[in-house]
Image (cartoon, rainbow, N blue to C red):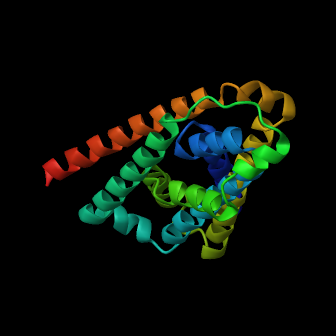
Amino acid sequence: MSYWSEFLTIAFIHLFAVASPGPDFAVVSRYSLSFGRKAGYWVSLGVASGIIIHVTYSLIGVALIIHQTDWLYQTLLCAGALYLGFIGTQAIKAKPRKDMSDSELVATQPRKRKAFIVGFITNGLNVKATIFFLTLFTTIIAPETPFAIQFGYGIYLIVATGLWFLFLTWLLTQPRIFKTLWHYSHWVDRTMGAALILLSLKLLWEWANLIELI
């Protein structure tokens, strides 16, 4: 059996999912424009590493358990919503930035570990990603697809996600683009922060509705 058709379907769906604006996109963009290329790269690697969580529980069937266990799904939904709200609140407080030299910009960058963890947690607590992988591994990927092939799909999703956000960081931090956007980066922060807060409120609304249905 050829699995190329299945793989191309997965790749096509993932491309649209990863390129569409969301928590990962907002966080990578914010760190890239606020702190420069290196910070954006570390956040991107954190996001890609977060995919490992989703791939792992999807491969061993835990995604289905999460979706079918009300309290567990609700807990993850609430935790993810609150975390996005926290990040959004921090971003919306951004103030106008003055011109800085390269050395000053480097000095303001967050530690690599912190940037990586922000990306990792943002993706790891993204319940929408849970639903995406649940759909992918239960409807798109056939039950008879060997585990080794599914594992290969998972590796692709991790690598493709990392490459996309690394490319996004590289693009946003091109000297001409970066210098143009730097003066308005606080507005980018505020816009992304507002978007994250709205997404957080939407998720909390969904969580509240789920609680009422119990």
The quadrant of the picture occupied by the C terminus is: bottom left
- In depth, the one of 64 and 79 nearer the eye is 79
Residue visible at 70% across and 44% down in the picture: 35
Which of the 4 image quadrants contains residue 173? top right
- Left-right relation of 95 to 79: right
Please state if 2 lies on the left or on the right of 52 as rendered: right
Q: Is residue 19 left or right of residue 195?
A: right
Q: Position of residue 91 (x, y in %)?
A: 52, 39
Comparing 45 with 32, the one in front is 32
Task: In the rendered view, tell whether residue 27 sits above or below residue 133.
Answer: above
Residue 13 placement (x, y as % from top left): 60, 45
Q: Quadrant of residue 172?
A: top right
Residue 159 image position (x, y, % from top left) = 72, 59
Quarter of the image with the N terminus in it: bottom right
Count of marks overlaid on the render = 0
Residue shown at 71%/61% (left/top)? Answer: 2
Does residue 170 appear in this view? yes
- Note whether residue 37 is visible: no
The image position of residue 38, as x and y in percent, is: 77, 52
Which residue is at 21% across, 44% downward? 209
Q: Residue at x 66, y 75 (%)?
A: 148
Viewer-closest of 14 and 148: 14
Q: In the rendered image of this protein, does residue 26 appear above or below residue 95?
A: below
Q: Examine the rendered structure and indicate whether residue 120 appears above or below residue 207.
A: below
